[in-house]
Amino acid sequence: ALAARVPRDAIGQNEAITGIDSMVRTARARHPAEIVRFVFVDNEEALVKVVMAPADSPRRDLDHRVEFDARSGALVGERVSQAAQAPSFMQLTRRLHAELLAGSVGEYVLAGTGLLFVLAAVSGLVLYLPYPARIGFGTVRQGPSRRRWLDLHNLLGVCTLVWALTVGATGVLNALSKPLSAHWRSTQTKALLAGPADLPVIAHPASAQAAYDAVREALPGRNV
């Protein structure tokens, strides 16, 4: 469970955080059978979140966070993984909307569907362009029901075109974001972490605090 906490002021760009290694050690001591996936500095809530999981896999639902106060280093609380808790109605609804309850396969299906939707909207605009010059914009012809429904379809489509394109295009980007990120982690990051072939294997990597300090020194005035 997440311990109750009072709102904390944001961490300023020039305000350094110390004791990150101690936070990592505390998190490892609480979960010795798990690994530290990454350390996230939340500048808005003044928190340092040590994200842990049983293994470094693309499955993010196994992640859980051990949270610390960024200024004092005190343990604030812990958020359990999604897999360890019964999904709520809103979580199920979100998964249904985002992945059709089918994981990455559902995300690819939704991305393809969204792309087809965008193409259909654009092609519909191309087909509608000659209509206003011939029958006038917004005209709904009376007569056979097929003609009337066609005119209503075209009118509603062109009036909501910007909304439809926005929803369709952003939906495609949202659906592809997680699969593309997982692919990047499993391919490109391996090459980045491998480094030159002639370097020895590092048995004990540098500390998280050292990495944080190096980034602040290289990019002063930025949020890490």
Image (cartoon, grey):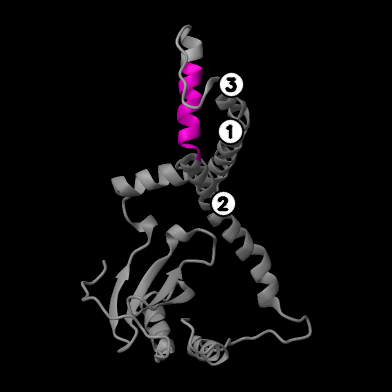
Q: CA distance from mark 1 to mark 3?
A: 15 Å
Few, some or many residues within 10 Å of mark 2 (<14, 14–19, 20+): some
Measure how far apart labels 2 and 3 are at the Cα level: 41 Å
| Quadrant occupied by the N terminus | bottom left
Left or right: 35 in relation to 85: right
Residue 196: image location, x then y, percent: 76, 81
- Kindly report the secondary structure that dominates the magenta region of the rendered protein: helix
Sequence order check, earlier mark of 1 and 3? 1
Q: Nearer the viewer, mark 2 or mark 1?
A: 1
Q: Are marks 2 and 3 in contact (CB under 8 Å)?
A: no
Image position of 219 (left or right of 71): right
Q: Residue at x 45, y 46 (%)?
A: 98
Classify residue 188 as left or right of residue 6: right
**Disc 2 marks which residue?**
176
Q: Going 56% across and 35% down the picture, which residue do you hit?
A: 121
Q: List x then y, in percent, for residue 96.
A: 41, 42
Mark 2 or mark 1, which has the lower sequence index? 1
Is 157 placed left or right of 84 in the picture? right
Instruction: Give the farthest residue toward the top.
Output: 144
Q: In the rendering, at what x and y percent does residue 140 appear?
A: 45, 18
Number of the front mark, 1 or 3: 3
Highlighted magenta segment, given as a residue range: 149-161
Q: Is residue 119 above or below residue 207?
A: above
Q: Check disc 3 and give the amino acid type.
A: Arg
On whether residue 158 falls in the magenta region, the answer is: yes
Q: Which residue is mark 1?
A: 125
**Which of the 4 image quadrants contains residue 26?**
bottom left
**Horizontal and vertical percent for residue 131?**
58, 24
Q: Secondary structure at mark 1?
A: helix
> What residue appears at the point 40 percent right and 92 percent down from the top-left corner?
18
Mark 3 — residue?
134
Q: Nearer the viewer, residue 11 or 72?
A: 11
